[in-house]
Amino acid sequence: HDKDGDHHYDVLSALQKSIRGSDVDAALHYLARLIEAGDLDSIARRLTVIAYEDIGLGNPQAGPRTLHAIEAAERVGFPEARIPLASITVELALSPKSNAAYKALDHALKDIRSMNTGDVPDHLKDSHYQGAKDMGHGIGYKYPHDYPGARVKQQYLPDKIKHKQYYQPVETGKFERALKQMHEQIKALNKN
């Protein structure tokens, strides 16, 4: 197909949307088109993005496994590169999906860009330089590893946004269910 035209980007888009939608057959179809065009660079880039954007915390091993598959594909080149690419495409398409991590960061970036921030709490400020303690920096900081479960009630966000919650866990896979449980436990600890 036209590697430099819109059709090329349409196929890349269709690959990502098929994987996002868990349609393994469509994903393999669009991967085959890209393989036939010989565009390993675009395939590698798009699969890496998919692993972190669409799969994310739903299957956190998808990212490293995708990178390993891409490395294998690059080492062997075409036509054998299709083998690791097919395997990782099937895995990504059938993996639990979660975009919660990057969406949380996007919300935080929106606050930063709109100047909705505030000052770093004094107890979190660097205290490793002369005069820092005189300014109240680092005083009252509780080292989490000194507490059971490495958790301690402590404010980390600036006062202005101290109740802000960026991360909204989803329960698409075992890993993120475990993160959600941990998140709820930490929130409960900080409410008391």
Image (cartoon, rainbow, N blue to C red):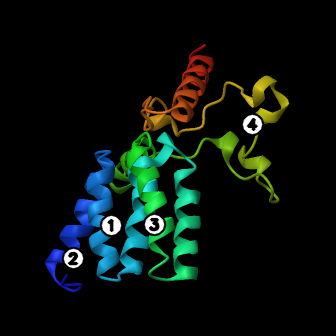
Instruction: Give the foreground label among 4 and 1.
Output: 1
Instruction: Give the foreground label among 1 and 2.
Output: 1
The residue pinned by badge 2 equals 8
- Spatial CA distance of label 2 from label 3 is 18 Å
Tag 4 secondary structure: loop
Position above or below: 182 against 19: above
Q: Earlier in the sequence, mark 4 or mark 3?
A: 3
The residue pinned by badge 1 equals 31
> Is mark 4 in CB contact (under 8 Å) with mark 3?
no
The image position of residue 62, as x and y in percent, is 52, 52
- Position of residue 165 in the picture relative to residue 10 (left or right): right
The residue pinned by badge 4 equals 141
Quarter holding residue 189 = top right
- Spatial CA distance of label 4 from label 1 is 51 Å
Position above or below: 92 against 68: above
Q: Going 81% across and 56% down the picture, which residue do you hit?
A: 128
- Label 3 crowd bin: few (<14), some (14–19), many (20+), radius 10 Å: many
Quarter occupied by the C terminus: top right
Q: Going 27% across and 68% down the picture, which residue do you hit?
A: 12
- Spatial CA distance of label 1 from label 2 is 11 Å
Q: Mark 1: which amino acid?
A: Leu
Q: Earlier in the sequence, mark 2 or mark 4?
A: 2
Looking at the picture, tell me which residue is in the foreground, 38 or 128: 38
Find the residue positioned furthest to the left: 6
Q: Mark 2: which amino acid?
A: His
Q: Earlier in the sequence, mark 2 or mark 3?
A: 2
The disc label shown at residue 85, or none = 3
Instruction: Give the foreground label among 4 and 3.
Output: 3
